[in-house]
Image: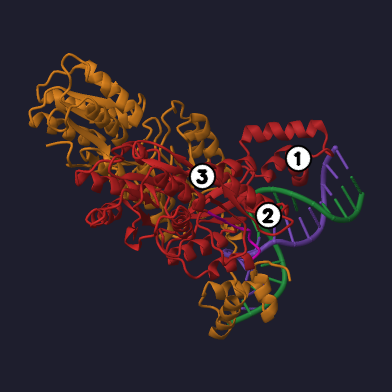
Chain colours: A red, B orange, C purple, D green
Amino acid sequence: MKKTQATIKDLARELNISVSTVSRALHDRPDISEKTKKAVRELAEKLDYQPNQIAQGLRQKRSYVIGVVVPEIVHHFFSTIISGIEDIAYERGFHVMVCQSKESFEREKEEIETLMSTRVDGIIVSVSKSTTDFDHFRKIQKRGIPLIFFDRICHEIKAPGVVCQDYEGAYEATEHFIKHGRKRVAHLRGPEGLVISTQRLNGYLDALTRNKVKVNKQLIVPAGDIDSGYEQTKKLLELPERPDGIFAVNDNAAAGALMAINEKGLEAPKDISVVGFNNDPVITKLTKPTLSSIHQPGFEMGQEAARMFFDVLDEKNQDGPKIKVLPTQLIERGSTL
Amino acid sequence: MKKTQATIKDLARELNISVSTVSRALHDRPDISEKTKKAVRELAEKLDYQPNQIAQGLRQKRSYVIGVVVPEIVHHFFSTIISGIEDIAYERGFHVMVCQSKESFEREKEEIETLMSTRVDGIIVSVSKSTTDFDHFRKIQKRGIPLIFFDRICHEIKAPGVVCQDYEGAYEATEHFIKHGRKRVAHLRGPEGLVISTQRLNGYLDALTRNKVKVNKQLIVPAGDIDSGYEQTKKLLELPERPDGIFAVNDNAAAGALMAINEKGLEAPKDISVVGFNNDPVITKLTKPTLSSIHQPGFEMGQEAARMFFDVLDEKNQDGPKIKVLPTQLIERGSTL
DNA sequence: TTGTATGCGTTATCAG
DNA sequence: CTGATAACGCATACAA
C-alpha cells in the first residue's frame, strides 16, 4: 500500500462525480445538493483528505505564509513578538515562516531572498544591527509584496511599521532618576544606526536637558549584552565622579551593570539606581536586586504588525503607510527606589 | 505598471523561445547551447526572475519546507535547536516552519495538522508536557511524512530521534554532590510523563543508590520554573534535616532554588550546592553565585535531527529508526565546589 | 445542480 | 539542440 495523501481527484473517482463538484462541495457552495455535499464530506473524512495548500497557493497566487525576519529568536522580546504575529495570522489561516538574520546584513538579504522565492504573501522585518543599505527592502516592494517593519524600523523605506515608545520610555526612566535626586545618570547605549538606540538615547538626553541636568558625554557608553554591560560599568565606576544612576538600552546590559556594581561593593539602589529596557521576565527576576525595567508590549507589537500586513493585503490602508507607536511602561523593582 | 514577479513564460516570450528551453537553460542542462543559456541567464537577471517554489513544489511533490514543533521558542534551549535545524536545512535548500505547542496537547495536534496541510516534507517534534495520546504522530507516519523527534521523544512511536544524555548528566551531577561529601541531595524534578524528566530522575536515583546513599522521597519535589523552584526550595529548607545539595531539572528551577537559599541567609555552595540543567548562558551568569549546570548540545541536537530527516528523505536509513544520544557535560561554576 | 475546459508556473517526456 | 504537450492539485468561468 502506497502512502499518498488523497486528492480531490481520488474523491471524484470514487464517487463518480467530477472534480469540480468535489471542489465546490468541499467549499460548501450553495449550488451543490446537500446529498452530494454529504457524500463528499463523508468520503473526505474517511480518506483523511486534506486540501493541498501548495496547489491552492499556485491557483490563487497566494501561499498563506507570512515571512518574518528577526535578528535572533533567542531573545525573549523577539520570540514574544513572533507569538503575537502567529496569534493574528492563525485566525486568518496563515502560517508564519521565521528567519533569523543573526544581526548580519548579508544573512538578512539572503533570508529575504529565499522568503520571496517561497512566495510568501508578505514580509515582516525587524532590521539587523549591521544593516545600512536598504535595497533589499526596496526589492520586496518592487515585487509587490507587502512589507511591514516592527521595533527596528527603517525610516528610509516607505512602509507601515510598529514601534513602541522608545523615546518616551527612555525619557521616563531618566526623569525618574532625576526626580529621585540623581544627577549623574549614565546611559549604556545601543549600537549606532539602530533607530531604537537613537530614540532611547534622545529620550535620555532630552530628559536630562529639560530637567536642567548637564549632559556628560563620559557617561554615555555602548553596551548591549551582559558582558559589555559589566565591563563598561566597571569603567564608569572608576570615574572620579561615578554615576548614581544607570539607564541601560536593554536588560542584558543592565544586568551586567548590576554585576559590576555588586562586585565593587556598592549597593543598588542606594548608591546607584539601575533601569533596563525590555522587562525580560527571567533577567528582571534574577538580578540582585531585582531589575526595574521599561516594559515593551511585545506580544501586542506582533499582533499589530500582523494586522498591518492584513490591512495591506485587504487594501484597507487608504492613506499611506502609518507608523504605530505602542506604549511602554516603567516597571519598578528593587534596583530603583 | 503592475507589480508581478517574472515567470519562465515571460522569459520565453521575450526571447522567442519555448518555456521548456528556458527551464532547461536555467537548470544548466547540457543539451542547451551556451548561447541560449547566456541569453536566458542575462534576461533572468535583468527581470529579476526567481523560480516560483510553489509551482516547483507542486510539480515535484515537494515543498522544501520542514515543519518543526517545539513547546516554546522563548526557551533558549529550543531556539538554539531551531538554529541547528536551520543550519543543516539551508545547506540543502530547505526552509523551516516553526510552530509552538505552548505545552498544550490540543495545540500540538492542530499545529501538526496545519503543517501537514501545507505539505511540509517532514516534521521534527519535541513533544509537549501534556501530551499523553500519540495518534497525531501516527497520522503523520500514516501519510508517509518523515517524522523525527528530538529532546522530548516518544517511545510509543517508532521513529528516529535525538536526545542527550539526560540520565548520564543527572547521574554525573548527583554523583558530583556525593563525591564532595553531600549526603542529602534533593531533586527538583520535571513533570511526570515526560521522558526527559524520568531519565533525569532515574539518573539521580541511581547515582544515590549506587553510592549507597539512601533515597529520601521528601527530597524529590516537582519544579520547572523560577517561581516553583523558589517555593519548593523554601519548603525543603524548612525540613528538620535540610538538603545540602540540590539537583534541578532545569536552570530556571535551579535559579529559583538559589533565590530561596540566599533569602534564607544560607550560602551556596558552602551550605548547599546547586546544579541546574541546560546551561542557559543568561541564567547561569546571573544567579548568585553563578550556576553550575549540565550542558546540552542544543545546536548539535538540531543539526542531528535535521540530518536524520534528510536520511529518511534520501532513504539512507536502512536498518530502522535509531535514537541518537548526544553527550552532556557538567559545567562547574560558583554554585558547586 | 453538475460537468467541461482552462490555467496557475514548472518540469518531464516525447518528438523533431 | 529545441519545441510541443501533459501533468502536478485545485478553483473558476462558462456550459449544459
Q: Are marks 3 and 2 on the same chain?
A: yes
Q: Residue furthest bottom?
A: B35
- Determine whether B125 is above or below B242 in the image: below
* Residue appearing at x 41%, y 55% in the figure: A213
- Work out whether residue B30 or residue A2 is closer to the camera in this orientation and state it: B30
- Work out whether residue B257 or residue A177 is closer to the camera in this orientation and state it: A177
* Residue appearing at x 32%, y 34% in the figure: B252
Tell me which numbered mark, 3 or 2, is placed earlier along the sequence. Answer: 2
Q: Which residue is mark 3?
A: A328
- Secondary structure category for the residue under label 2: helix
Q: Mark 3 belongs to which subunit? A: A
Q: Position of residue A11 (x, y in %)?
A: 69, 40
Q: Position of residue B234 (x, y in %)?
A: 27, 22
Q: Which residue is mark 2?
A: A312
Q: Position of residue B149 (x, y in %)?
A: 39, 40
Q: Which mark is residue A16?
A: 1
Determine contact: label 3, label 2, CB under 8 Å: no
What's the residue type where badge 2 is placed?
Answer: Val
Query: Residues under labels 2 and 1: Cα distance?
Result: 42 Å
- Secondary structure category for the residue under label 3: loop
Query: Residues under labels 3 and 1: Cα distance?
Result: 61 Å
- Determine whether B15 is above or below A104 in the image: below
Horizontal relation, residue B31 to residue A71: left or right: right
Q: Which mark is residue B291?
A: none
> Which quadrant would residue B335 be assigned to in this image?
top left
- Determine whether B20 is above or below B157 in the image: below
Segment colored magenta: A143-150
Q: Position of residue B258 (x, y in %)?
A: 24, 31
Numbered disc in front, either 2 or 1: 2
Number of other residues with Cα within 10 Å of mark 1, as a class: few under 14, some 14 to 19, many 20 or more = few
